[in-house]
Image (cartoon, rainbow, N blue to C red):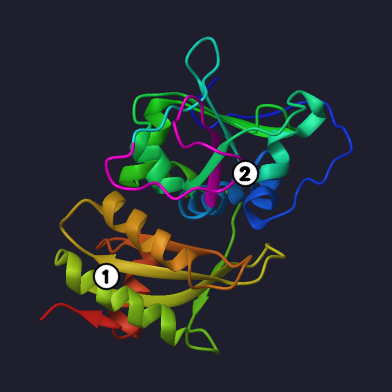
Amino acid sequence: MGILDFFKSKKTENTFPENELERTLKEASLDVSVRNEFYMKLLWNELYVLTNGHQNSEEGNRTLEKDTEVQLVTFKEGEIPVFTSTNRIFDKGIIKNKVPYMAMKGQDLFGLTKGATLILNPYSDYGKELVPQEIESLLNGTIFNETNRVEIKEDTQVLIGQPTEYPKDLVEELCSLFKKEGNVNSAYLAIIKTDKSEDKPSLIVGIETNANMASISGKAGALAEQIIPKGEVINFIKIENNDGISDYFLNQTKPFYKRT
């Protein structure tokens, strides 16, 4: 199974989807354009893992204290089952009794389990295998290079302009991030839409940098995910000299961030 392959089992009646992460998981299994949003939510939403053999383990949500050792339940081949909500643990009645579990942000869980294969929602209608290579590229941001690729097979006009409602909070947080990182020379904001698409315009941020764009876009995207309204999409591109969108940023707008 490839690193971007989602799997789907036969349909049964249950409460799925019951949160935004599960909504995007379901949509991403059918629509490649949603996978960027899914990966963002996977990083920043809580995921649930089953615990085993921990001295103080008990049913429910636990806080992982410093230097605490936790044994996670694994399958026979070493894969770790992970769930997008507590109800997913009990899907299809495979697990019938109450079990100890722990919740942690996706990014923290992936850092804790580096090198392991995770199985997201193994008992549910919609799930996903997360292999080590995919998890590593998710943590360092390179996976968004794959999910942001869009193939246009016919002549299509790209419409670009400025948002009617300026995302002040987003811009302020991005400025703080870029200043802290220190490797962004300037950043520009616009909205973009193709003339053949029925989707509403999405935000796009153009970044001038000589650093690793994947790392920058990964951090900026994860930050934006916490700020922009649910269902909205934001893309980050590197400013290039011979690119039409870059030309718009450089010649028709002013940067919202400039390194001093």
Q: Residue at x 38, y 69 (%)?
A: 205
- Quadrant containing the N terminus is top right
Mark 2, residue position: 84
Residue 184 shows up from this direction: no
Residue type (three-letter) at the residue carrying disc 2: Thr
Foreground of the two, 50 or 182: 50
Q: Nearer the viewer, residue 115 or 141?
A: 115
Observer-side mark, 1 or 2, equals 2
Q: What's under tag 1, amino acid-wise?
A: Leu
Picture coordinates of residue 140, whole percent (x, y): 31, 44
Residue of label 1? 177
Residue 52 in sight? yes
Is 77 positioned to the left or the right of 236 in the image?
right
Q: Nearer the viewer, residue 252 or 215?
A: 215
Question: Seen in the image, is 224 located left or right of residue 250?
Answer: right
Residue 118 is marked as none
Q: Residue at x 67, y 38 (%)?
A: 29
Which residue is at the far top?
Answer: 76
Give me the C-alpha separation between circle 1 and circle 2: 28 Å
Give the secondary structure at mark 1.
helix
Tags 1 and 2 touching, CB below 8 Å: no
Which contiguous range is marked in magenta? 46-68
Residue at the farthest right position: 13
The disc, 1 or 2, on the residue closer to the chain's N-terminal end is: 2
- Magenta residues: mostly which secondary structure? loop
Q: Quadrant of residue 139?
A: top left
